Image (cartoon, rainbow, N blue to C red):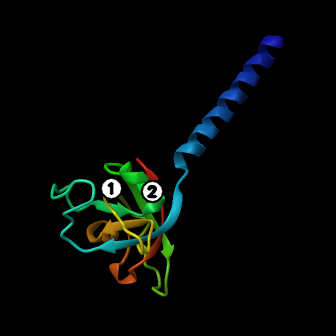
């Protein structure tokens, strides 16, 4: 009977560990996102080197004295941040690479390229609430 008890205890422990691991994986931060128009160069991280259309600048919250350069984030629109009704596009996500710094006065934590913003929301909204996590 003692062996059976240990087996059940081990299964419970393993289940708890799996739940905790999955919880940490799905954790996402939230904030506001805005967008900027092309061209997407020059950038604070890479000068005139282009990294395509799925790029972003980040504000001081994520910039970390330039250590954000090259990091990628999965971004999802979760709601409007102004009067625009229903700005989000069906739960779509965009993966962007940080190539720039969004200077003081930036209205969002993440300043998405217009291409990335358009993937997740209607650009007419201008500013949206997002959740994002590093990938």
Place residue 59 in its image quadrant. bottom left
Residue in the image at 36% along x and 52% along y: 66
Residue in the image at 41% along x and 71% along y: 104
Say left or right for 92 vs 61: left
Mark 2, Cα crowd under 10 Å, few <14 / some 14-19 / many 20+, is some
Label 2 element class: helix
Place residue 6 in its image quadrant. top right
Tag 2 or tag 1, which sits nearer the N-term? 2
Judge whether 26 appears above or below 42 on screen: above
Q: Nearer the viewer, residue 107 or 18?
A: 107
Judge whether 99 appears above or below 2 on screen: below
Q: Nearer the viewer, residue 4 or 127?
A: 127
Residue in the image at 53% along x and 63% along y: 30
Please report contact status of discs 1 and 2: CB closer than 8 Å, yes or no: yes
Label 1 element class: strand
Q: Nearer the viewer, residue 59 or 129?
A: 59
Distance CA(mark 1)–CA(mark 2): 10 Å
From the image, tell me which residue sits under label 1.
98
Residue 12 percent across, percent down from the top left:
72, 29
From the image, tell me which residue sits under label 2.
62
Residue 19 percent across, percent down from the top left:
63, 39
């Amino acid at each position: 009977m003692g062996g059976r008890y240990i087996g059940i205890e081990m299964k419970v422990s393993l289940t708890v560990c799996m739940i905790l691991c999955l919880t940490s994986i799905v954790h996402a931060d939230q904030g506001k996102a805005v967008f900027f128009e092309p061209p997407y160069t020059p950038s604070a991280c890479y000068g005139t080197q282009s990294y395509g259309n799925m790029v972003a600048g980040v504000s001081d919250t994520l910039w970390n004295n330039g250590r954000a350069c090259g990091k990628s984030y999965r971004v999802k629109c979760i709601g409007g941040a102004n009067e625009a009704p229903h700005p989000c596009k069906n739960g779509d996500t965009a993966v962007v690479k940080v190539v720039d710094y969004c200077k003081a006065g930036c209205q969002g934590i993440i300043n998405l390229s217009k291409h990335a913003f358009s993937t997740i929301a209607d650009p007419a909204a201008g500013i949206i609430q997002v959740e994002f996590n590093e990938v």
